[in-house]
Amino acid sequence: MSESRVTYEDVVAARESLADVALRTPLLHSHVLSGIVGGPVHLKCEHLQRSGSFKIRGAYVRIAGLTESERRRGVVAASAGNHAQGVALASGLVGTSSTVYMPQGAPLPKVAATRSYGAEVIFAGDTVDVALERAGEHAERTGAVFIHPFDHPDVIAGQGTIGLEIVEQLPEVGTIVMSLGGGGLAAGVALAAKSLRPGVRIVGVQAERAAAYPASLAAGHPVEVRPASTMADGIAVGRPGELPFELIHYLVDNVVTVTESQISQALVLCLERAKQVVEPAGVAGVAAILAHPRVFEPPVVAVLSGGNVDPLLLAKVLRHGLAAAGRYLTMRVPLSDRPGALARLLARLAELGANVLDVVHERLGMHPGEVEVQLQLETRGPAHSAEVLGSLRTDGYKIVCT
């Protein structure tokens, strides 16, 4: 395969290589998203793929293409988690050793899974970009073959097989929307899908806190940014890949960004309404649909790109998503430090139908004769939250929402 470009024929060849390795993931119709968009919306379930994300596709195609001499030297990669697992699994299937550099603070389940597939894990830096530098140095020092997560023709061709499947599963697809980090997924899907269906629109979605593509597209070349902390760690890439950027520049119709609140609301929707557990980076496409529903021409396919989520992070994101959707209230209420004051407040909340999740009593820093109560409440939605707050304030409670 060419080292400088990727063709449709490369994607077709990649699918043949993946025939007994990658799953043909299902396309699920989403009634709730279809109602929001005003036309059919489907979810491409790559979070159900082997190793928990689409990354096994590109990693396997790249590693399976190595010569026997290269395989004996082993491979090295860098990743926040999904590419790491894909490389580790692919290396085991091909029969070569793997070393993976991961940023400090990488989700523990992703680290454990990577090790379980047989890779040696080394922590380096706080970002994927630093880990990439260290992996490159490792390759130069040891002779191991560097498996880039997105900037290689084989990797892009492997990810492009998703585009082939989408068009075959839904020939009339109007828009494909997916997460965008370094660009391998979007570049491959755009190439494959537009080769089969030239009129299909391709939309890439970045986390607002780690969005290198808008500035890069405006400049006409990859521009480096410093990603801020984001729950969507899988797409927190500071600089687009050269090869993916070239394809995305010509083939992707639009790149949009989504906020942390929009990502968390999308995760909650996938869990509650689609019954799918997806990681924050994997729901960016759904977040964009929720934020800009009339932008996407149906039928729409949103790629759920990964499901390797840390349970602790999932709990935090769900709470964040519930709060953003107006279903989770955190408040501080000063009360008289007398018997029965807290009981009366809790009884009133019960009358209003609010579910009390947590109560904290605080006396330090309060005036004599007063205490402050911190409450976490579950409500039925924004209207119910407003009703609860309004009723309590009418009753004379001085509430500060946090």
Image (cartoon, rainbow, N blue to C red):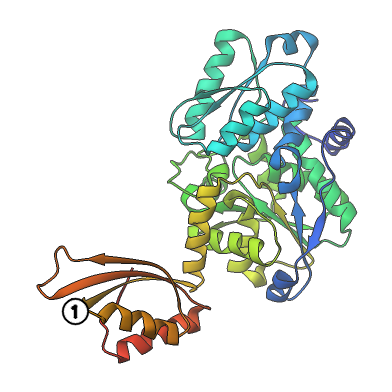
Comparing 75 with 148, the one in front is 75
Relative to 11, residue 292 above or below: below
Foreground residue among 288 and 391: 391
What residue sits 49% from the left and 84% below the top?
Answer: 383
Q: Is residue 177 visible?
A: yes
Q: Residue furthest front?
A: 339
Residue 153 in view here: no
Query: Left of 276 or right of it: where is 42?
Result: right
Where residue 157 sits: x, y (%)? 78, 35
Establish if 23 lies above or below 151: below
Say which residue label 1 marks: 338
Q: Relative to 127, is 339 above or below?
A: below
Q: Position of residue 222 (x, y in %)?
A: 55, 39
- Identified by mark 1, the residue type is Arg
Image quadrant where one finds the N terminus: top right
Q: What's the residue at 80%, 60% (across, down)?
A: 28
